[in-house]
Each structure stands twice: as structure tokens, then as C-alpha cells.
Amino acid sequence: MLGPSWQAIAEAQAVVGDGYRARDNLIGEGQQKGCHGAMNSAELKNLTVWKRWNENVAGDAPPAPGIYVFRLADGKTIQRLKGNSDILYIGSSKKLRERFKGHLKVIDVERNIAYRLQRVRQEIGGLQVAWELYDRVDKATVAERLFLTKYEKDHIEFPPLNRSEPGKRSRMIEEWLKLPLGKMPDLLATLEKIRSGALEIHRTG
């Protein structure tokens, strides 16, 4: 089974060094001009065109590794502990098409993600989804954790439908968040290094 090793954390920190340095192309102009602390979909520049979430989207998504983000449609945002955001859920998968099919299978008893996405559509309004492909599933997994870490840093909580995170993922996020603010890696710059191949993610057994 593939997955990022703990060495990836140390390498990510070593690559980007101390403090927030050059902004990568995921950062929106608003944040570059000083509007910090409110991660929202406008910052995520490498995602596909946003698509209205419905039964047709699964067929549009490729059977390939990637990260994906759900947001509220029509410019809606929700209040977080700190700031506002339109992002509802951040995920990754080795096969986006199959994951999206799963997110359409509502299980009332388990109250799975499909159940919650359906309730949002019915009770709040439309949803949109976008994604970004990676050549390896472990790169997508690390990218997902970087996105979640930045969201938690900006809003002091995870996206509303990322209710809880599994052990390894949660521990990696906690390790990044433990760093003093002045020494926290530029998470999005780290993501760009992973995307470009400048930072290698080691495979584990």
C-alpha cells in the first residue's frame, strides 16, 4: 500500500525553511495583498473548473489519483470560528471517479458524506466540486493534508464536513500546527514543490 512517510514532514520543513516565503500560484491576489486568515476556494488556482454537484459529475471525473474540494455554490460562505469560507470538504482518492460515485450513495444510518452532501443541497443550496490530478496517490494524500492543515490554521477548525480525521492524517496535521507561527512552513509553497517534483514523497511498504 502506498502512503507518505514521516520523513516527508521533515523534508517539507527543510525545503521551505523558516517563515512564509514566496507565494505559489495557489495563493489568490487578495491574500498576497494582506487578507490573511480566511482560506476559501478563491485561493485554489490549480483546480479544474468548478462543476455543479449532481449525478453527472462522477462520469466527468477521471479514474485517477487526485484531491477534490466541495464548496457552496452561488458565492455563499459560512462563518467559521475565525473568518468565513465557502469550502465544505477537502478529500483525496486514488480514483476520483469511484470516490464521487460513493459520494452519491446516501446511507442514512451511517450518515456518510453522501448523506451530508445531500442535506446541504436540500437545506442550504447548491454545491460545486473541483479537483486536481496527481501522478501518484501518495502525492494526492500529502496535498490533501496540506490543504487541511492550512484550513485549520486559518479557521481554527476543519471544514464542516471533514468532521474528524483518521490517526496518521491527524498526527501529520498536528505536527505542522505545533510549529511556531514564525517557523511554520509555507504549506502551499510545499504543495507546489510536491506538484513540480522538487520535493520527493517517499513510498512506504
Image (cartoon, grey):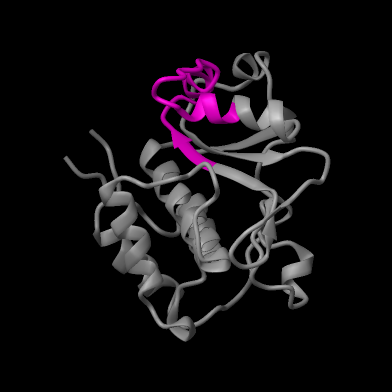
Residue 45 on the magenta segment: no
The span picked out in magenta is 90-117
Picture layout, residue 174 above or below residue 122: below
Nearer-the-camera pick, 85 or 34: 85
Give the quarter of the image for residue 100. Answer: top right
Which residue appears farthest toward the left when viewing the image? Answer: 205
202 on left or right of 87: left
Residue 116 on the magenta segment: yes
Q: Estimate the x, y position of residue 187 in percent, counting from the top left.
A: 50, 65
Q: Residue at x 47, y 47 (%)?
A: 144
Q: Quadrant of the N terminus?
A: top left
> How many marks on residues?
0
Q: Residue at x 39, y 47 (%)?
A: 164
Q: Residue at x 48, y 44 (%)?
A: 162
Q: Residue at x 68, y 14 (%)?
A: 56
Q: Is residue 202 visible?
A: no
Q: Estimate the x, y position of residue 42 in percent, counting from the top left.
A: 74, 53
199 on left or right of 30: left
Q: Estimate the x, y position of residue 27 in percent, counting from the top left.
A: 68, 62
Which residue appears farthest toward the bottom when viewing the image? Answer: 182
Picture layout, residue 124 above or below residue 42: above
Q: Is residue 13 visible?
A: yes
Q: Estimate the x, y position of residue 83 in percent, counting from the top left.
A: 67, 66
Q: Quadrant of the C terminus?
A: top left
Picture layout, residue 62 above or below residue 1: above
1 on left or right of 137: left
